[in-house]
Amino acid sequence: LERLQAPLLTLFVRTGKEVDALAGDAAQLKPRFASLRSMCRIFYSLNYQDLPEYFEDHMGEWMKEFAKYLTYQNPVLEDADEETEASPVDVLQAAVE
């Protein structure tokens, strides 16, 4: 756990900055959103039963990023014609919720 906690947070924040920088490029955003979803699932797996001290100490950083994705909207990732498959944003938001 000690070897994973800090790198996971660093990667999560760094990927979030990349998402901000690549806001107009759907091809670059889709894999980043898939990665963010995986990181959210890892976060949940490490915290659902007991909150490790590292995550407690860095909760503000995690929650800032989670809040950003709960309200995130980007038309380049939305397909108005798609009725059955969730967008990358919807999939990430479901992982955060």
Image (tube, rainbow, N blue to C red):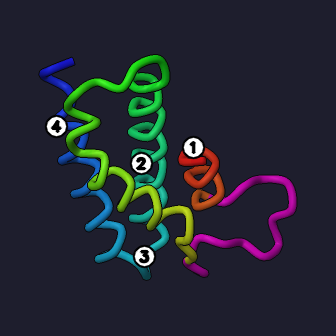
User: Is 44 on the left-hand or right-hand side of 77?
Assistant: left
Between disc 3 and disc 4, whose residue precedes? 4
Say which quadrant the N terminus sits in. top left
- Residue holding disc 3: 25
Left or right of residue 26, residue 64 in this image: left
Kindly check if marks 4 and 2 are in contact, taking CB atoms under 8 A apart as contact: no
Helix, strand or loop status at disc 1:
helix
Q: Residues within 10 Å of mark 3 (few under 14, many from 20)?
A: few
Q: Amino acid at mark 4?
A: Pro
Residue of label 4: 7
Q: Main secondary structure of the magenta part?
A: loop
In three-dimensional space, the C-alpha distance between marks 1 and 4, rounded to whole angstroms, equals 20 Å
Q: Is residue 5 left or right of residue 44?
A: left
Q: Residues within 10 Å of mark 2 (few under 14, many from 20)?
A: many
Residues rendered magenta in the picture: 74-87
The dot on residue 36 is 2
Q: Residue at coordinates 41% horizontally, 48% vertically from top-left? A: 36
Residue found 49% across the figure and 63% down from its top:
69
Which type of secondary structure does the marked residue at label 4 adopt?
Answer: helix
Q: Spatial distance from mark 1 to mark 2, Cα to Cα? A: 9 Å
Q: Amino acid at mark 3?
A: Asp
Tell me the amino acid under the disc marked 1.
Ala
Circles 1 and 2: CB atoms closer than 8 Å: yes
Q: For the residue marked with disc 2, what is the amino acid? A: Leu
- Number of marks in the image? 4
Q: Quadrant of residue 61?
A: bottom left
SS under mark 2? helix
